[in-house]
Structure formats: structure tokens, C-alpha cells
Image (cartoon, rainbow, N blue to C red):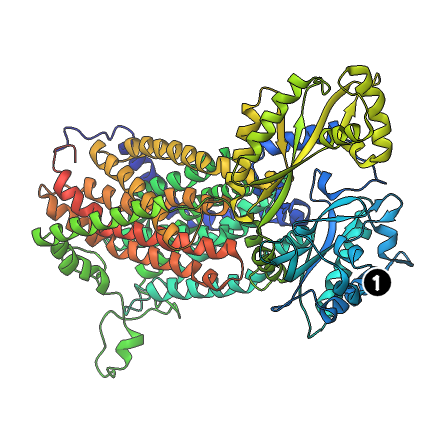
Amino acid sequence: MAKCKTDCIEKPLVKCFETLGYFIGSHPLWFLIIPLILAAGLGSGFYFLDDRLSNDLEKEFTPSDGKAKAEREYVQETFHGNDSMFSSLRLSTDGNFATFIATNDNNILTVESLQAILQLDQKIRSMGVQFDSQSIAFNDLCAVFMGSCVSNDILDIINYNASYIETVNLTYPWYRFKGMEIPLYRSLGSVTLYKDMPLVENAKAIQLFYYLRDEDKSKIDLWLRSFIELVASEQTTSIQVSYSTSMSRQWEFEESPDSVISLFSITYTIVITFSIVSCVRTDNVRSKVWVATCGVIATGMAVLSGFGLLMMVGQPFVMTAASCPFLVLGIGIDDMFIMISCWQRTKVTDCVPERLAQTYQEAAISITITTLTDALALFLGCITTFGSVRSFCLYAGISICFCYLYNITFLGACMALNGQREGKNRHWFTCRKIPEDLPDGKSKASKICCIGGRYDPLTGNEESEFMSRIFEKNYGPFLTHKVTKSIVGVIYVAYLAVSIYGCTTLQEGLDISNLALDDSYINKYYDAESLHFSKYYYSAMVVIKEPIAYWDKEVMKKLDTCIADFERLSHVNNTLAWFNYYQEAANGFGLNISYEQGYQDNLAGFLNVSPIFREDINTSASGVIQASRFFIQTLDRNSEDDTMTGLRKAAENCSIGLMVYHPSFIYFDQYTVIVGNTIQTLLVAVVVMLVIALVLIPSPICSLWVVFAICSVIVGVTGFMALWDVSLDSISMINLIMSIGFSVDFSAHISYAFVSSDNADVNKRAMEALAQLGYPVVQGALSTILGVVALSFSKSYIFRTFFKVMFLVITFGVCHGLMFIPVFLTLFGVCKCC
């Protein structure tokens, strides 16, 4: 039966762990004290927590090598901008601004509603904030155009007089005002037009912006916070107001950790209680209460050490890493249950070092396999381009390594000390020596708390728990029955079919608004924006990156062809280009600009009349246009991925060197890389898992079944998370990477126990594996789910997503470990290699 066993590495490792177990059992105090000192020392790294916090949304939740970041750098180097000629259209970043959307379910363009808007506008502009004993108002910070603060078009049109709206005929989406075309779609939302006419009949929303200069950030932040307080406190019956600022997403995201602080205490209380209760025995000597308590302490020490070490060496701490303790807690408790189960199968009459040696002989390789897979899956996640994923993976991976170290040393020492107590037949709580049987003259009530230390005289082992007997006597025989195997096969096919269907419906990309808490004020703003201002979206800048002959008709035909390709896209509305306006002006004044000198000479005069277009042209010292830009208006706020991809493709197909950019592309870039990043990471991780399984599980076929379980669970988690309204983004990517490690945990334990059995009957080998590890697997799964269930009540998308994916991982992992894999091993793992 052992002809094909590949135990050349596993066998000496088992011997090493056996020796280590005997040594720890002989000197438990050293292995109790040294880990405590180490954890306390490394935990001092938390002193640097405030310095290591890195919660910048762009830096951590967008691809570090995103194409848009290079495009932004080029735009900033090419078009420097002018503080006195502010244009939101030409910003290379989101800029500094405050905004509010006023809505009315009937018509916002009434005198009453506009009067309320004008009053709020006046309060905002006159609002003063105290900074260094000075009062600062909007006029002191506002972005400037031609010597005046940038105003709102709709208010300019009605001349800041609400009753004037009754005399104005508004055209939509463009309105001609003082010789200029005003994009009214930026100000008015949910517009209804008169039949067959571009005239506005009514609208349900008005949006106003208050742009600020890019100067002292402290002043800007102070004014923006005051804006939020002012608008939040405004009460009016004629309009409903939602609001936001350029810093709101960042500020609200930074509030997320505070929302789960209370959940941490609840979670640890639940898990500690469950761990202790599940280790309580009716036998007052054999009870493992203190071991369970030490197991929880070991996981806390692991988090303290892992986090502290990384903070000491300067590793940034992103808020996504705050969910690591939940993960480490689940893994640590799972390993503890496995070690306790193996301890209970040792002979009670043996000395403590021998019992711990036998425990390590059985358990150490099993928990080594799961730790290696968990840690390596996370470390491989560091290859991603998302900073938030790298931070989580690094903090979680290092903490899991410390968890393994402390389970082998600290927890082993605790088990040894607990074993010494058991060897002297002392009560688990009072530590007083108690009899095995009830003495004469004692009441039966004394049996509950005053006797203990029984064991099976035939095997020399502790009496097994009720749940272990269920797995041994009932579940194992039931699962290995032919009819049950057929039913399991049908269930698996159904599971796989639903999972694959779910994968085909999976959405991609992180909605940045999800990073705010559910009850955040900006969610109301995003809802209003999506409802009323979704028809028209951003104006993307198209940069002509090379000098071209703008006066040459053949060259301009090529450019016009490229513009036509843009405008043929379903999500593009129109084009705003300086050279078109220049050509119209030249035609109007009868100027000849069809040759180079005439084009250059007349351009200066045109720019004097329309100075804003100077911001769109980069000229050399000799006056040659090195680069220029024009703008394309896009449609449909809900199509950002398709729009960006289509614009970029059209630019690439142009015979002239073009580049498309908008500040939002920084965030949209995640759509182009998230799938590739995830697949690459998962594939590399699965290959590494296969190598680990082949090395440490003494059977190639059983190793392949473990990897099969990994792939099967990943498919299931991906499919069902799509059905549970979870998109593939940097947050769920973290959890998918994590699922690799968790998915192998339960299957590896059962597979290793299966292949280690000497029984010739595959059904009996499966039953033995389930009898030995079925209950510990259930304990580990329940403890992990209990460790994250409190996160389901979180107001944060990040932590709720963590719960959803973890729940799926654990559920499917247990199903594979306790149902699918045992059945498949009996059906297809019958060769001698197993």
C-alpha cells in the first residue's frame, strides 16, 4: 500500500516535530515565557501606528501602475494652468470644491425653490471660519476666473433673482449666455423639455459648485468642514438638499475603522466563549478550558507581534488590514482544535513529554500544511498592483506565521502544563486533587464537580466527546454508503453549475462611494447625483501629443476623422475644440489661416479675445505648437468602464498621436486590471499550493485532490459572491486570495488523515479520518464564522464584504472537507498511491 508514497520529506519532518514536542513537553515554562516576552517586545511597534496609517483612496485603492497616472503626469507637465483662469473642465485632478444638489419632486425652477437656493448660496459665500485668529470667507479662498470668484451658471443666468426665472427661456443642454455656450446639463438635472423643442419645461434638481484655490490645505479643509456643518443644519420645506466636498470620500473612509471597534470586542467575546465552551468536558480533570483560553491568547499575541513588527520596519497600514485579526483568530483557533483532538488520542498513562511528542507527530504536519498555504497565498497576494491588497496580505501573512509559531511553542507549553495537571488528577478550576470515582457516602450531586480523570482502559485514551462519537458511529458510515455517495455527486454537480453561472454574472470594479459608511451624508448625495445627473457625465480631454500642421487641410481632415470616430461612440455627445472655434472666428473675420505664418500670426489675436484657450495649447519659445488638447463630452454616468475603454481605443486607432484623460480614469483603471490581477494571483497561488501538497502529503493523488478542492471552492466563492451582490474589486480580491488558504485547511486535514491511515478499505479510511478530525473541523469552522459574523452588522462595505466572502469560504470549505472530498477519495483515490 505504500509503494507510491512520497514521504521522503514528510517522514523526517514528522520525526523532527515529534522531537520538538518531547522537548517542549519537558521544558514547558521556557516556551511559555519566551513567546510572551517576544510578543510584548514586538507589540511595542504599535507606538508607530499613527505614523504608519495610509488611507489615501487613490494610492491604496487604484492600480499603482495605472495608465491614467502616467497620463495625468504628462498633462500636468504639458499644461501648467493659470491660477487667474480657473476652469474645472481643465483640471488634471478632482480639485478642491464643495457642492450641493437641491431637489424638488415637482419643479425646482419655481420662485420659491430658487429663493431657498439663493439664500443658501448667500450663507455659504458669506460663511466665515476662524484660522489663526483670522476670519476667512469664501472670497478669500475661491478659485478665480478673470479676477472674480468662479460662479454658478444657473445663478448667473437668473441674475441672482428668483423671480427672473419667469422671464427666461432656458434651452437644454446648451444655453447661449453673453455670447457663450453654457453647458446647462451641469446645473440642471432630471429636465423635461417642451415637445419638439429644446426649451426647458421643468427640472427636478439644481447643482451648485464652490471651487477653491489649490493653496493652504489646512484652510481648505477647515472651510470644507464648515460647509458640511452649515448645509447639514439648514432646514427648508421647499427643497431637499444633499451635499459633498472634494474631501468627503476620504474623510468618510477614515471614519470606517471606528465603526468596527465595538464589533472587535463583541467578536472576541463570542469566539472566546465558544472556544472555551466547546472544550469543556463533563470530566473535571480532562476539561480543556485553560488550553482553549491560551489558544485565543496565542492568536492575540500573533496579531500583536505581526502588526508590531511591520509597523517597526515602516510598513504602511491600510484600513483593509483591520480585518486581519478576525482572520488570524479563525486560523489560530482551528489549529488549536486540531492539536487538542490529537492530544486526546494519546495514552493517558504516558508521561507529558511523550504525549506532546505524539500530539506533534499527528498534528504538526497537518497544521504546517494549512499555515504554509494560508501564509503563501497571502504573500503571493502582495504581487498585486493595489496598495490596499498588498497591505492586507502582508499584515495577515506575517500574523499567520506568528500564529503558527505561538501555537507550536506557547500553546504546546500550555498543553504540557495542562497535561501535568491532568497527570496528577487535579480539578481544572481549583487544581485540587480529586478522585476518579465517587467515594462512598457522597451525594450524586458531587459527581458533577468533585470527580474526574476517567479514561478508556482498553486504549488508554481519554473518553471521546459526544460529537466525535457522532462522526465515528453515525456520520462516517452514512457518508460512505453507496446511495449517499450518489446523492453527494448530484449535490456537487448542482453546486458547480450554480457557481459557474454566478461567475458569468460577476460585476467588476469598486464603487468608491462604497468606501463610506452606509449612513454617511455622501451616500445621499451620490444617490441624488445618479438619479438626476446621470445622462451627461464627464468631459474627457483629448491631447494631441505631437506637433501637427493645424493650418494644413489634409492634416485637419485626419484629425476630423479621429474626432468623428470619437463622436460615433454610443457614450459620446459632442466635442469642444479650440481649433474649431479659431477656424469659426477666422471665417467670421475673413482671415486667411491656411498657411503656417498666417495661422501663427492670427492665433495670438484669437487667444487675446478668448484667453481660456491659452490653457489648451503648449507652444515652444519660437511659437510652434508642441501639444494641444480638446474635450469630448460623455454620456451615461453608469458606463464609465465602457466609455473609458472606447475613448482609449479610438485614440489608439487615430493616425495622429492622441491621448485621452480625465481625473476619474485614475479610479476607472481598476476595471482594466482587476480581473487579470486576480486570475494571475490565484493561478500562481494554486500552483504553489500544489507544490506544498505534493511535498508534505505522502500521496500524489491525494495532493491533487487537495488542489482540486482549492479550485472548486474558489469557483464556488466567486460565483456565489456574484449572486450575493458582491463585485470583483480590490476588497473582494483580498478575500478571494484569502480563500485559497482557507479552502485548503479543511480538505488538507481530512486528506492527510486519510492517507496516513493503514487501513486497506478506503471507506474505513474515510470514516477514520472523519472520526479523528470531523469534530475539530466543525469547531474550527464555527469559531471562524463566529469570528466574523459580527461584521455582518457593520456599516462599512469593506467589513461586510469580508464577512460575506469569509462565510462562503468557510461554508464551502467545510462542505468539501466533510462531504465532497471524503466521498471523492473513496471513489477515485483507491490506487495504491493513497
Residue 620 shows in this picture: no
Please tell me whether mark 1 sits on a helix, a strand or a loop: loop
Q: Could you tell me which residue is drawn at 31 percent across and 43 percent down?
A: 366
- The answer to whether residue 346 is left or right of residue 302 is left
Question: In the rendered view, would you say 596 is above or below 605?
Answer: above
Q: Could you tell me which residue is drawn at 81 percent across and 24 percent down?
A: 591
For the C terminus, give its image quadrant: top left
Q: Nearer the viewer, residue 719 or 82?
A: 82
Kind of residue at badge 1: Met
Q: Position of residue 390 (x, y in %)?
A: 53, 39
For the N terminus, give its image quadrant: top left
Quadrant of the rendered structure where residue 363 is?
top left
Q: Please state the total of marks drawn on the protein image.
A: 1
Q: Position of residue 610 (x, y in %)?
A: 82, 35
Quadrant of the rendered structure where residue 657 is?
top right
- How dense is the environment of label 1, judged by Cα within 10 Å: few (below 14), some, or many (20 and up)? some
Q: Nearer the viewer, residue 623 or 245?
A: 623
- The answer to whether residue 526 is left or right of residue 208 is left
Say which residue label 1 marks: 127
